[in-house]
Amino acid sequence: MGAPYTLVPTAPVKLLDAATTGTGGVLLLKGECARVTVVVQGSAVGITTGAVSIEEAFYEDLPSNGGVGASAGPQYAGTWSVIQSVSGASVTSGSQQIVHIFGSAWAVRARISTAIGATGTVTVWAYGN
């Protein structure tokens, strides 16, 4: 997994780059955006199978004792919550699928939950305000 990326409003962040498997970087929003847009784009080469999950979690520096202002504990390493999945076949030949997230999220990532099949790849960007 890539390092956490802090959101700069209006500046897209690339979470996955020409990938067929794996988990992308973490977009660390810290609840400061009301709207986030995630763009999943396939390569120009055909994609026949696969899926990309857009996920969220409370990720960075969980309080070790659960209280406000507590010392930082470990980053979250469990299963993230799926917001929406995008089929690989829906982004074949350079197509895009857009996922809109409304509400406050702490951290968002893209994960290839089923390997992208054939000879294609996916790239994922995110931005918000």
Image (cartoon, grey):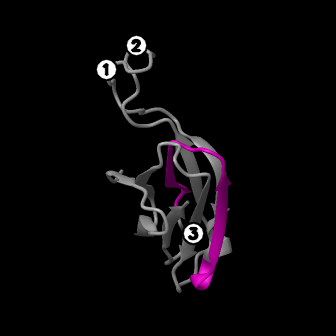
Crowding at mark 3 (Cα within 10 Å: few <14, some 14-19, many 20+): many
Type of the residue with mark 3: Val
Give the label, 1 or 3, closer to the camera.
1
Q: Earlier in the sequence, mark 1 or mark 3?
A: 3
Tell me if I can see residue 32 in this picture. yes
Type of the residue with mark 2: Asn
Kindly identify which numbered label has been placed on residue 40. Answer: 3
Q: Earlier in the sequence, mark 3 or mark 2?
A: 3
Give percent across and percent down for residue 17. 41, 69
* Contact, mark 1 vs mark 2 (Cβ under 8 Å): yes
Residue 104 is one of the magenta-drawn residues: yes
In the image, residue 125 sits, relative to residue 84, either above or below, namely below
Q: Give the residue displayed 48% in from the left and 48% down from the top.
A: 29
Type of the residue with mark 1: Ser
Tell me if I can see residue 19 in this picture. no
Range of magenta residues: 92-115
Q: Which residue is mark 1?
A: 71
Q: Which residue is mark 2?
A: 65
Residue situated in front as seen by the camera: 64 or 129:
129
Q: Secondary structure at mark 3?
A: strand
* Contact, mark 3 vs mark 2 (Cβ under 8 Å): no
Marks 1 and 2, how far apart at CA: 8 Å
Give percent across and percent down for residue 69. 38, 21
Q: Secondary structure at mark 1?
A: loop
Marks 1 and 3, how far apart at CA: 37 Å
Give percent across and percent down for residue 109. 49, 52
In the image, residue 119 sits, relative to residue 30, either above or below, namely below
Residue situated in front as seen by the camera: 110 or 117:
110
